[in-house]
Amino acid sequence: MNRWRMRIAFLFLSLAAGLQAQSAVAPWILLEEARALIADRENPDMGEALRLLRQAIEQQPTFPEAELIIGEIYLREGALELAKGQFQKVLRPEYADLMRVPEERYRVLYLLADIQETQGQYADMQKSLERVLQDQQVYAAPDQQRYRDTFFKSYLDQGLDRTLKLYRLENAGFALAAHAKLGWFAYRTGRYEPASIRHSLFALTTVVTEAMLELRRVDPTYEYESLTDFLRAAVRRESVRGYLAESGFFRIAYYLAAATYEAGHAARARQLWRVLADGGWDPALIGNYAELARRQLRSPAAEPLINPSARRLD
């Protein structure tokens, strides 16, 4: 009799352990089911996805990935305030520290910055993007100040081609979009030097660094000589050409030149504008920046300022 009792007790313990294990994975199963529902672009079921995500959160109350997807659903539905609240929640330490992929925090900050820009909350947008950059040591670390100073000085004193021969920014892809946006924003708020030039130079150098790695996979002996030669090599390789388009390279270059001109370095600006204007680049790749560069070469003019009070943000 005792033997049967022991067997029954063992079965109950095994069943309890199995149920416990099942509940541990259940929230992630619900998360993946919700992802599948919203991934269907033709017929997404946002309501059911939200139900599954809330069910997952009931089982795992601190679940940053589920909270993030809820925010993305709100964003797709145009509920910007609700989406913003979700993204801010995910960025709180008790959530962000539990993310299985810590780098997802950058994506949350970019989503939050996009909403803030849409709502005209430029100071908050800048703060969100600067939070991304705090993890880029060469940009943010105090002991890298000398590097930053010589990098900046090299561009102004010796020109872009010399700078791109000497400097590389590796493992910086996560910060590229933040630098590009902040370079544009600083330009449009009249903060040309150092803010706009610095951010745009970081962004452009990051693109060149990443593109050079890909070019060297095909030709290990390839060396940077000039921006024009680099671009001609880059557009011949489909993957690099696609990266230039995706990263907004020509836009970054245009605003780097524009900020450089407004900061009083006209010769440096014209050198870069000429690369854009005279290279014969495919319009599908460069967009309207070749024509904008030609206009600047003929008659330079700064774009109108936005949110002038943001000049106090540096």
Image (cartoon, rainbow, N blue to C red):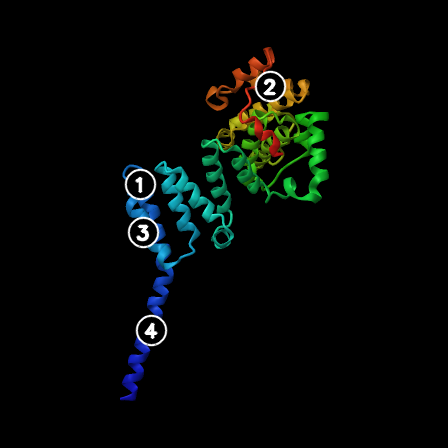
Report the residue at 54% width, 38% height from top.
Answer: 129
**Where is 99 relative to 209, above or below?**
below
Q: Name the residue nearer the viewer: 272 or 54.
A: 54
Q: Which residue is mark 1?
A: 40
Report how far apart the C-alphas of labels 3 and 4 lie in the structure.
28 Å
Is residue 262 something that shows in the picture?
A: yes
Measure the alpha-carbon separation of dots 3 and 1.
16 Å
Residue picked out by circle 4: 14
Q: Answer with mark 1 or mark 2, whichever residue precedes in sequence.
A: 1
Q: Residue at x 67, y 35 (%)?
A: 167
* Kind of residue sitting beneath label 4: Ser
Q: Residues within 10 Å of mark 1 (few under 14, many from 20)?
A: few
The foreground one among 100 and 228 is 100
User: What amino acid does circle 2 point to?
Assistant: Trp
**Amino acid found under the numbered disc labelled 1:** Asp
Which quadrant, please, contains the N terminus? Answer: bottom left
Left or right: residue 103 compared with residue 55: right
Residue 289, numbered circle: none
Q: Which residue type carries mark 3?
A: Leu
In this figure, which residue is indicated by the disc labeled 2?
Answer: 273
Residue with the mark numbered 3: 52
The percent coordinates of residue 130 (x first, y second) are 57, 39
- Which element carries disc 4, helix, strand or loop? helix
**Image spot of residue 81 (x, y percent):** 41, 39
Instruction: Point out the residue furthest to the top here.
Output: 298
- Tag in front: 3 or 2: 3
145 left or right of 294 in image: right
Give the structural element (helix, strand or loop) at label 2: helix
